[in-house]
Image: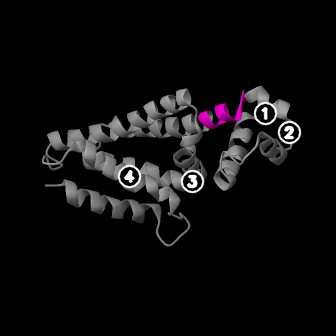
Amino acid sequence: MKDKIMKESIDLFDSKGFSKTTIQDIVDNIGVTKGTFYYYFESKQELLRDIHLSFIENLLHQQEEIINDKNLNNKEKLYKLVYIIISEIKTSGKSARVFNREIRHLEKDHIDNVNSKRREFRLNFQKVIDEGIREGEFRNDLRSDIVTFAILGMVNRSYSWYNPDGEMSEDEIVNLYMELILNGLTK
């Protein structure tokens, strides 16, 4: 039931926004009582925090598998890191929009928790860039932190416009991004 509440809430937060969605809206759409909601969540704020943490922890897990794969060079790792963000749009597009748009509604302690995981995600990207620079795969005259912010800025905004059922596939989008990224990074 907790997953069902989270899924319905993501749908509502995506369509109506966090502030305009009430707990009554959530329970009405599922067909349960507020008591059921409060059994799983102390508040709508806690629910939003759990949605954010679930989304970023899933990405961090996928990211960790890629980074730890010794069979991949840094260009391949970077490709796969970009790919997981784009591929999540098809399976978790609403969650991505809620994650990126509704963070402003989290209370400070929740924001700090989520932002520490966002920072970890960003720094993992940066480690791949740094390693690629050290190993001569990427240019060494660029700041890896700024390159990382640029890549994530470009890729993370895809959730707002990319349609997985549209004219370009995930692979085509990722290949286009990688062409843009690598032409600026490779020697």
Specify whether residue 71 is painted magenta. no
Is residue 73 something that shows in the picture? no
Q: Earlier in the sequence, mark 2 or mark 4?
A: 2
Q: Position of residue 52 (x, y in %)?
A: 56, 38
Distance, label 3 to label 2, CA atoms, is 26 Å
Q: Position of residue 175 (x, y in %)?
A: 35, 62
Distance, label 3 to label 4, CA atoms, is 16 Å
Comparing 8 with 74, the one in front is 8
Distance, label 4 to label 1, CA atoms, is 35 Å
Q: Earlier in the sequence, mark 3 or mark 2?
A: 2
Of tags 2 and 4, the one toward the viewer is 4
Q: Amino acid at mark 3?
A: Gly
Residue ID for mark 1: 37
Residue ID for mark 2: 32
Q: Earlier in the sequence, mark 2 or mark 1?
A: 2
Image mark for residue 93:
3
Residue stretch rendered in magenta on the structure: 41-49
